[in-house]
């Protein structure tokens, strides 16, 4: 059944493209696209809701349950992208409604030196002029009047998305769970490392990735078998593993890797807590 629904989703996506190309009037193409999207949602909604209830009953967090549920009707990368988008918006809303958040003793932040602290204020400062200029140019040059409003909506959404990503860095910290260490870079990347697979822990500040304009951040992978989660262009801790692990990116997994370098605001405390965890093999 899942294969049939996914095949139908692919066929409908191709139909959307075909209709958009065949229709001369943009309004007609848009209406046809909306009709087909509604048909697709109606066909897949019962499957999605059932899988969502199943995953929530197993204790999965809501965004992971949503991804699993959407994967019944969408390819996994698309399901991951939709779930990530909802998580980013949720983080933004939670940050607005509840500005302060304290991490528990099992949570470890990594956001303090993030380049997003610099980028977001600059974007907020410059965006009114940029959005106004784009809106004016579209109004003067575009033969399709609604284009200026579409571009304005996309610009505002992009700003909200960036603000939500920054909020997710604070709301989704590294976490020591019952069976392993969960590493995060906000809503964009995640890796779970069982304690039993950790062979060595090193406090090793380094700058593994350089960028001319902004310090590199997020999930990186080298073919030599190394996962990197730098923040502000730097990592603080290194793990050597007994067996390889993979990390989940926003669209696809990265790995396998037997070494993991990641950033942490309190590397000494995190290393000490890791060494005390049963199963890591440390005294």
Image: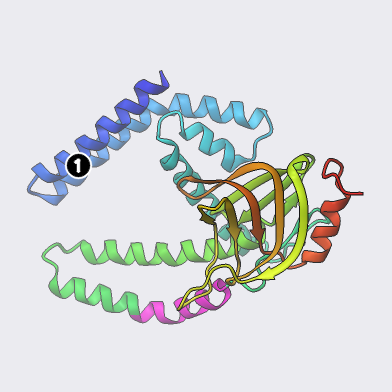
Residue 2 image offset from top left, x and y in percent: 42, 22
Residue 31 image offset from top left, x and y in percent: 20, 42
Magenta-colored stretch includes residue 128: yes
- Give above or below for 279 relative to 189: above
**Residue denoted by label 1:** 17
Q: Going by the picture, which residue comes out furthest to the front? A: 224
- Give above or below for 77 relative to 202: above
Element class at badge 1: helix
Q: Residue at x 77, y 48 (%)?
A: 199
Residue 213, by quadrant, is bottom left
Q: Which residue is drawn at 54% across and 68% down?
A: 209
Magenta-colored stretch includes residue 55: no
Query: Between 201 and 11, which is closer to the camera in this rendering?
Result: 201
**Residue range highlighted in magenta:** 115-129
Q: Residue at x 14, y 62 (%)?
A: 144
Residue 62 image offset from top left, x and y in percent: 60, 40
């Amino acid at each position: 059944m899942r294969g049939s629904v996914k095949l139908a989703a692919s066929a409908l996506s191709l139909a959307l493209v075909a209709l958009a190309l065949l229709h001369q009037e943009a309004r007609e193409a848009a209406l046809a696209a909306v009709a087909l999207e509604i048909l697709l949602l109606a066909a897949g909604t019962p499957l999605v809701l059932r899988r969502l209830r199943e995953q929530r009953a197993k204790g999965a967090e809501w965004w992971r349950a949503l991804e699993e549920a959407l994967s019944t009707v969408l390819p996994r990368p698309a399901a991951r992208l939709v779930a990530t988008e909802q998580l980013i918006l949720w983080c933004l809303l939670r940050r607005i409604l509840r500005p302060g958040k304290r991490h528990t003793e099992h949570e470890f932040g990594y956001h303090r030196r993030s380049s997003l602290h610099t980028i977001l204020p600059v974007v907020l400062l410059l965006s009114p002029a940029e959005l106004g200029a784009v809106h004016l140019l579209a109004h003067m040059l575009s033969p399709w009047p609604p284009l200026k409003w579409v571009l304005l909506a996309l610009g505002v959404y992009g700003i909200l998305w960036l603000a939500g990503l920054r909020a997710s860095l604070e709301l989704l910290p590294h976490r020591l769970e019952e069976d392993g260490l969960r590493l995060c870079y906000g809503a964009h990347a995640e890796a779970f490392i069982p304690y039993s697979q950790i062979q060595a822990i090193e406090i090793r500040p380094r700058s593994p990735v350089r960028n001319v304009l902004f310090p590199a951040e997020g999930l990186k992978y080298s073919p030599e078998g190394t996962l990197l989660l730098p923040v502000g262009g730097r990592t603080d801790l290194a793990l050597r593993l007994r067996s390889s692990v993979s990390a989940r990116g926003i669209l696809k997994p990265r790995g396998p890797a037997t070494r993991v370098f990641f950033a942490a605001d309190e590397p000494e405390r995190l290393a000490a807590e890791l060494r005390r965890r049963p199963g890591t093999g440390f005294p």
